[in-house]
Image (tube, rainbow, N blue to C red):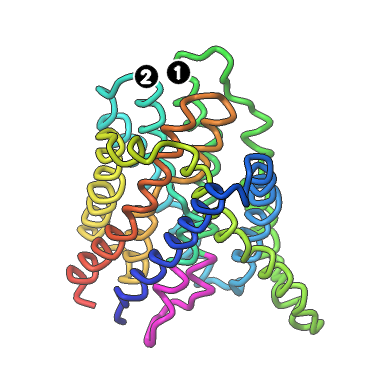
Amino acid sequence: MKFDILTVLNTTLGMFIVMMVGYFLRKKDTIDAQFSKKLSKLVLHVTQPVLIVSSMIKLDMNEKNNINLGILLLISLGVHISASILGYISMRFMKPQNARKLSEHSIIFANVMFFGLPIVKNLFSGEGSAVSPDEAQAWASFFSIIFHVFAWTYGMMILGRGRDDIKLNPKKIIFNYGTIPCAIGALLYFIKFKSIIESCELTGVISALEYIGGLCTPVSLLVLGGVLSTYPLKKLLLDPKVYYVCFVKLIVFPLAVFFAVWATGLLSNEMLMFTLVMAALPTASLTNMFAELHDIEPGYAATCVGMTTAVSVFTLPVVVYIGQMVLGV
């Protein structure tokens, strides 16, 4: 199959434009701080969980998909472990400590749902693709299971360095707005919820979930753009630490992961390209949310999230093109 680089470029560009709309709406006070917090809660508590569930139930439960999902969980585990090692090594000499913690966190956690899901949906929408857009979206949702486990365990350990008030919470590791919808989505997948709904001719239920989940990406981008507008533009653009994070996160890591997995010869081209995209995504908004919650330089965290998002408009098509050239597709 042929992976359309222009499709990837247009998708990332479109999301960047939405983020810039949020930037100017916050500047004009159309979106103020209070409204922004309410939108963040809407995303975290409603649209993201619904998006995860609606994406996971798009797959038909069968042996082939079960095997693929098992492989994806192993890939996701490998990607997050690799990112954790690279993040620790590459950021260990960065100062001050808060910048080091947030930079390391930024390397590990990627924007799988808000940013990655629409990317893979469009990437696998071309003719001749062995993977449908719905399958690709489901892959991303199952990939995010490991993300949420890492975020509430190792991610909290990183942020808790030098802080006695930030500790692992066993309850939150299991019960949070990421793991619960993942568990619900996996359960509905295994009981063949999609087939049950279709046999009862109640497809409106799935449509409603898709409508609500569809709000996730644009609303989160508007909020992110708004947060960036509250910090001096010069500070956003001229911090060398952020560009170092972008280089490691968006170029070094995805290419290292791709060539390491490609060398094994174990995965299909579609699975390889999916893995490459997941590794090349910008920093998750969760980094900024946790930084604000625990008062760990939220301005620097927002800069990491915003700049990796902006720079990925250019780097993501490039790394996808490199992967395409290596695979000869």
The amino acid type found where label 2 is placed reads: Gln
Which range is magenta? 120-138
Q: Foreground: 32 or 170?
A: 32
Identity of the residue drawn at 48% across and 78% down? 132
Q: Residue at x 71, y 73 (%)?
A: 206
Indicate which disc residue 190 carries. Answer: none
Q: Nearer the viewer, residue 200 or 3?
A: 3
Q: How many marks?
A: 2
Q: Is residue 78 visible?
A: no
- Residue assigned mark 1: 161
Q: Is residue 197 visible?
A: yes
Question: Which quadrant of the figure contains the N terminus?
Answer: bottom left
Question: Is the Cβ of the residue at disc 2 closer than 8 Å to that at disc 1?
Answer: yes
In percent of width and height, residue 173 lies at 62, 34
Please report whichever mark, 2 or 1, sits nearer to the chain's N-terminal start.
2
**Viewed as shown, does residue 320 lie left or right of 115?**
left
Q: Is residue 123 covered in magenta?
A: yes
Q: CA distance from mark 2 to mark 1?
A: 9 Å
Circle 2 packing at 10 Å, graded few (<14), some (14-19), many (20+), is: some
Residue 97's disc number: 2
263 over 38 or under it: above or below = below
Most distant residue in the front direction:
28
Label 1 crowd (10 A; few <14 / some 14-19 / many >=20): some
Kindly indicate the quadrant of the structure image that contains residue 62: bottom right
Residue shown at the point (69%, 50%) measured from the top left: 42
Residue sitting at 68 percent across and 59 percent down? 50
Amino acid type at mark 1: Arg
x and y, in percent, of residue 202 in the image: 80, 79
